[in-house]
Image: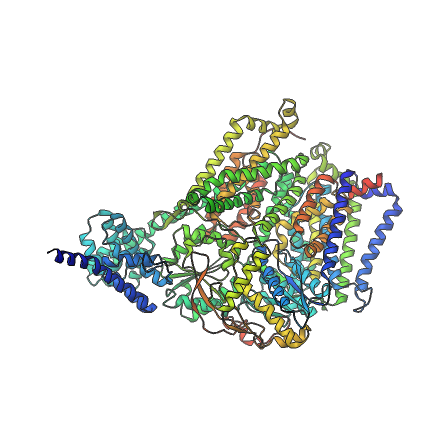
Amino acid sequence: MNQPLLVTASQKAGPRWTVAIGAVVLLVLLALPLLSLLPDGHGLQVSAYTLTLVGKILCYAIVALALDLVWGYAGLLSLGHGLFFALGGYAMGMYLMREAAGDGLPAFMTFLSWTELPWYWAGTQHFAWALCLVVLAPGLLALVFGFFAFRSRIKGVYFSIMTQALTFAGMLLFFRNETGFGGNNGFTNFRSILGFPITAPSTRAVLFLMTVALLVASLYLGWRLARSKFGRVLTALRDAENRLMFCGYDPRGFKLFVWVLSAVLCGLAGALYVPQVGIINPSEMSPTNSIEAAVWVALGGRGTLIGPLLGAGLVNGMKSWFTVAFPEYWLFCLGALFILVTLYLPKGVVGLLKKKGEQ
Amino acid sequence: MKRRSLIKAFTLSASIAAMGLSWSIQAAETIKVGILHSLSGTMAISETSLKDMALMTIEQINAKGGVNGKLLEPVVVDPASNWPLFAEKGRQLLTQDKVAVVFGCWTSVSRKSVLPVFEELNGLLFYPVQYEGEEMSPNVFYTGAAPNQQAIPAVEYLMSEDGGAAKRYFLLGTDYVYPRTTNKILRAFLHSKGVADKDIEEVYTPFGHSDYQTIVANIKKFSAGGKTAVISTVNGDSNVPFYKELANQGLKATDVPVVAFSVGEEELRGIDTKPLVGHLAAWNYFESVDNPVNSQFVADWKAYAKAKNLPGADKAVTNDPMEATYVGIHMWAQAVEKAGSTDVNKVREALAGQTFKAPSGYTLTMDKSNHHLHKPVMIGEIQDDGQFNVVWETGQPLRAQPWSPFIPGNDKRPDYAVKGN
Amino acid sequence: MPKALLCLFLSLVLLPLAAQASDADYFIAAKANEQARLLQDWAAQPDPARLELLTSLQQGRLSPTDTRKLRLNNRLRGLVDNALASHQLLSTDARLRLAAAQQLQKSAQPPQVAFLDRRFASETDAAVHAALGLALANLQLAASDPAVRLAAVRLLGETGDPMARTRLEALLEPGVETDSNVRTAAETSLAQVKRKLLFGELLGQAFSGLSLGSILLLAALGLAITFGLLGVINMAHGEMLMLGAYATYVVQVLIQRYAPSAIEFYPLIALPVAFAVSAGVGMLLERTVIRHLYGRPLETLLATWGISLILIQAIRLLFGAQNVEVANPGWLSGGIQVLPNLVLPYSRIVIIGFALFVVLLTWLLLNRTRLGLNVRAVTQNRNMAACCGVPTGRVDMLAFGLGSGIAGLGGVALSQIGNVGPDLGQSYIIDSFLVVVLGGVGQLAGSLWAAFGLGIANKLLEPQIGAVLGKILILALIILFIQKRPQGLFALKGRVID
């Protein structure tokens, strides 16, 4: 548990297997968007439905990974990561709304008879500024919140509840129509991104590829972090913060860095999520969503890099399937799954696989 | 070890059972029909009954031999009150299940979420709930009311002698687009009738608001200034605490009538209506409407609820969105028969001008161009048995004005459906 | 002679009957507008014979024996109330006359002035006399004699009636009142009325804050035990509230069916039932799931989250997704009129008392019983307690059951003011956690202060900045407060460090 699984697994199974499995998965992910470009009716064509579904799950996987960085490694369970995800999504959504509205105001504003854009919408018609916002909005919020929280050494359950209150407050704020983000409806009906129509197969393919790229990049980042001295300090921080302090480390900087990094990753994932799914609204900030993200991580196996990805994929895949197969009973399956996993797989699916590998 | 194999065995058997289920349904040649209503999450409270109503209607059509000689096969999915999931499930219904039509959505945001998908894939959606208007997509048919088919007649009634000749209006709503737009239209309408801004108060509460003490106190204060009516666009769940507070603080319908646009028979099931007698609701249909079509409709529904053992079947009621679902499915079936195919473009053409003898007691017409139904408007007073007593109605169906003339700029909108509005 | 007596007797009995029958026939035959005029006429010239008809009309019937429902609208209902009040002034029962006079303060119309004047002059009961005076004063503001107007204005200044404010303001509009004496008096009266109204408003705000606080407290109290003492992040806590509320519903339905005479007391019967149901489910969960997770608080979050999903969907399948109807019994409906602009609903008053009672009970249980001693021992040092012979497993189970049971009691209270549906618990879970965390985990007194503090702060902010912004501001304040006092209001002081 104390050692990142990837390290253990590569030690156990040998680097070749790990690389081989990783490469196959990556190849499949890279092939999906290309296959989606095949003409209709082709036997190998991947439907837009599959592509957006997988794309959505990949975005969730990035969130899970980001959450795992703070929870699995630094021991800070955030129940407010949905907020950062949504902020990134809203920043991207602002750009997409401006793009769809052309020179006019976004549709929901004309609806409410607003005549001019609120100040915080300034510059959002430029893609570059929107990208900055994607990073800055969640990053700055995380920085401010983290600075105060870690300064007064809020941790454990208190930290979780505070983050939950934060995202709840965010949700209420964005629900307000006067806040200027479309209220309950949020943003929808996007047309184009950088001039490319948003529903075109090629645009979808590119967005998908970018999601894969971001996922790979965050995996690599996480791997480097976990292997570095920084990662060791984080793990020490999780397991015995006081002893770490006695050894002369100041945990605040470490916590703050990984916290902000995690928030920014979430924001980026949100920015990729919005054009693929086609809607962003305040319900993304509901505490329920953030709790679910924690469930992905726990299910997959926290403190590992592959675990969160597996967890996000499994839960969302099952959700998509259950909601069609047994629309009235799927919550039972999902609920039972959470209970069984925490009871019998305390180290998540990855823990299970690892045990299998050892036998 | 044993435990784990048990889990594995369970998952395996569950998945096999599920596959068996999904296979066994597919038989003969059928027309697939999608039903996109939340069965879990916050909206399940309203949408579950629409799913059941859709299933009942489909069963009835099938019992009469289906459409064009083919049986209808419902595909039910659960978007779980999650708006992005609505878009995903909509796409799934259209591209994976290849349904001919989808009946679904309740909230405006869920409709806005699936709209781009339906426009992109040229699907067909029937939307059965009253809404704020400001939309007219060629891929959607709106069988609920536009603001002029619900809100404005209700206020006209309140202004009339019989409605109490209200001079002041307290507009209370949940903070989202339907109440906001409706209240905006109403304010413009009230202005046009000479009501000054000081006699209009507009208040919004967050979703799921459950403490109405301050608001009811404010209504009381406001109503001291002259004959007041409350126009409530409070959403689903918040209605119970609102009405309970109203009753317990002694505000009676004879003093300050509340007219609600989102409270129907289904919502009243969760409230003790004795203290609420006299408060009003405006709809296009009430279960208490007395005509043979409706008697049959209500009896069918009660029998269906009993036969399927739906929860609370002994108290099953019908309401306006259920009627709109029923009318929508029948109109679609008629249009498919007329077009001789389920092709969306042909069905859309065939739907224009389609008529249906509805439970409301009127023959409803689908407008030739604007994709909305012509609907009668009725004002009902709440009675102590949870039903409504119709105290006023328009007498004939009204044409919908999805682009309300009370919102500036709408006069330039086309009166036919265009993509991407 | 006997014949004449009989005739007299018959005419005495039959005449009113005949008049009443004709009135009823007349009324039922008339169109809505004529009915309205009829009622106004009757209100101005009351006739005791019509009392029965009007009483029946108020109940939506033509006569007490007639079971047919009469379809009246709000306007007619209002006029019936007014006419009935006029008639009731003739009653011999002073209480009835008082109620009638109070009704007339709201609804009396100018044509009734002459009648009210006569009654005012002949009224013997002091309270009724005063109430009638006010009703009359409202109408006398339009009198032609300045002296009458002056008296009326002075009288209105004595009341705290919100309508008096509107009437005085209307009088003070430029050009309405010409007599300068009356104008000055009206200004003084208006200031007086405004002062009284403000007092009522402030009192109302304080009460609604207390009431909201008591609800938060009831919602959070169970969590203060399961989370605060046992350390289980119990996401299924809201569902325990919901189970309590549904238990109330079931009790109500059963009593309605099998013992309708006891229906008035169903909430009292529901209390032990709800406690038992929630506590039972809680103990079952503790034994099957949570027991394995002590010491892993964050994982209890996931498991209990799963439990809450299952419970919600189970209730949804069992009772339907719609809300179920839980009616206030008579003694919990309506409210007490403290001031003209302040009504305190009985249900809320009872809930405030009930919340305090439950807190007291819990406190006694934790501090004055063996179980409480054991619970405190286990929460402070599980291993040491086990060494001293405390059966930790049993204590855990009972403590979790107690927390869940108290949540069930909270559910009974919540069912009286809000909706009862499968999602009931979800709307209280965040607030509950905030109360417990703000008060300091493990501190009962902390939860008490936090709940009432949050309730009052919320209700003070709401009129200023609206419900939505108020709630956001409160959340922001809590986040800031926790920065200052990371262990909550009442922190456990100790030197323990890991």
Say how the picture is coloured: rainbow
The answer to whether residue C180 shows anywhere in this view is no
Residue drawn at x 21%, y 57% is C13
Q: Seen in the image, is C423 located left or right of residue A156?
A: left
Q: Is residue C358 left or right of residue B198?
A: right
Q: Is A306 drawn above or below residue A132 in the view shown?
A: above
Q: Residue furthest top?
A: C388
Q: Is residue C129 left or right of residue A229?
A: left
Which is nearer the eye, B329 or C166? B329
Percent from the top left, x then y, of residue A13? Answer: 87, 43
Q: Residue furthest left?
A: C1
Q: Nearer the viewer, residue B17 or B51?
A: B17
Q: Relative to C459, is C184 above or below?
A: below
Residue C394: image quadrant is top right
The picture places residue C183, in percent across and down from the top left corner, at 25, 59
- Residue nearest the observer in this picture, C325 or A188: C325
Tell me where residue A343 sits by quadrant.
top right
Q: Is residue A137 above or below residue C247?
A: below
Please state the horizontal and vertical placement of residue C196, each as a whole percent of the image: 33, 49
User: Where is B214 relative to B31, above or below?
Assistant: above
Task: Quadrant for the N terminus of chain C, please.
Answer: bottom left
Instruction: Let me know if residue B211 appears in the view.
Output: yes
Quadrant in which the C terminus of chain C is drawn: top right
